[in-house]
Image: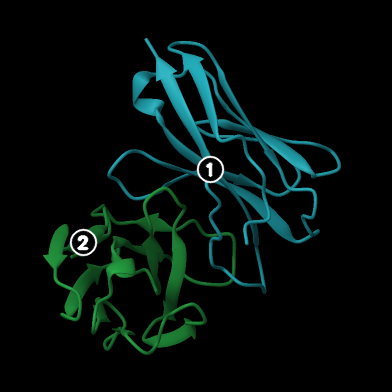
Amino acid sequence: EAGVAQSPRYKIIEKRQSVAFWCNPISGHATLYWYQQILGQGPKLLIQFQNNGVVDDSQLPKDRFSAERLKGVDSTLKIQPAKLEDSAVYLCASSFTSGGAYEQYFGPGTRLTVT
Amino acid sequence: DAKTTQPTSMDCAEGRAANLPCNHSTISGNEYVYWYRQIHSQGPQYIIHGLKNNETNEMASLIITEDRKSSTLILPHATLRDTAVYYCIVRPGQGGSEKLVFGKGTKLTVNP
């Protein structure tokens, strides 16, 4: 079974530029999550989708971050404009469904460096 | 904020059992205890979860105290590849927020 795919794996941009990350979840997984992991800390949820609807985006900085999952499969997370404090690893995860003790499967992450 | 407390770091000799403790004194009746680990430069990996009974799978065993205020993850025969950050997370099973709230975890180093 293929895992969660993310691209790119690494990205370096200057502050005020924009960047986009892509995630392809495990086939059949209805729930998709984006997490931000700053160096030395645990991952923090940014947004959760159930199919193509947003379930939780309470910690997404909506003035600069946006995410979509138009067809209920792949998802894109965008930052515009980027700030220095956005330097982090962005992790995508998926789970079979919501509402239950289902484990989340994580991708390898995209390491973003903002200079 | 994370609802769990874990030691910052632990060491273990290769081939010995690694016992990782976790305190979750404010756990609610419908909340599960989950363990994930994160090997360097990889995404977190699910290990095991439990509600009140002890659980075992091919990776580890989870021992939950009777009052459910603490638990221990046991890796029975640690290898060098088990070196990672281990996260203990409390999360509702049904009807609650499904997000995983990660703390800083325990950095386990397995030494040869």
Q: At label 1, which amino acid type do we have?
A: Gly
Colour green maps to chain: A
Q: At label 2, which amino acid type do we have?
A: Thr
Q: How many marks?
A: 2
Q: Residues within 10 Å of mark 1 (few under 14, many from 20)?
A: many
- Estimate the x, y position of residue A101 in percent, counting from the top left: 59, 59
Colour cyan maps to chain: B
Whether label 2 touches label 1, CB < 8 Å? no
Q: Is residue A105 above or below residue B98?
A: above
Q: Is residue A6 left or right of residue A94?
A: left
Residue placed at 38% from the left, 57% from the top? A38
Q: Is residue B61 left or right of residue B59?
A: right
Find residue B91 and report its image quarter: bottom right
Residue placed at 79% from the left, 36% from the top? B65
Label disc, if present, on residue A113 of the rendered structure = 2
Q: Residues within 10 Å of mark 2 (few under 14, many from 20)?
A: some
Answer whether residue B44 is visible to the viewer in this image: yes
Q: Is residue A69 above or below residue B74?
A: below
Find residue B53 and report its image quarter: top right
- Give the SS element for disc 1: loop
- Estimate the x, y position of residue A92 in percent, counting from the top left: 33, 64
Residue holding disc 1: B105
- Front tag of 2 and 1: 2
- The alpha-carbon separation of the residues under discs 2 and 1 comes to 24 Å
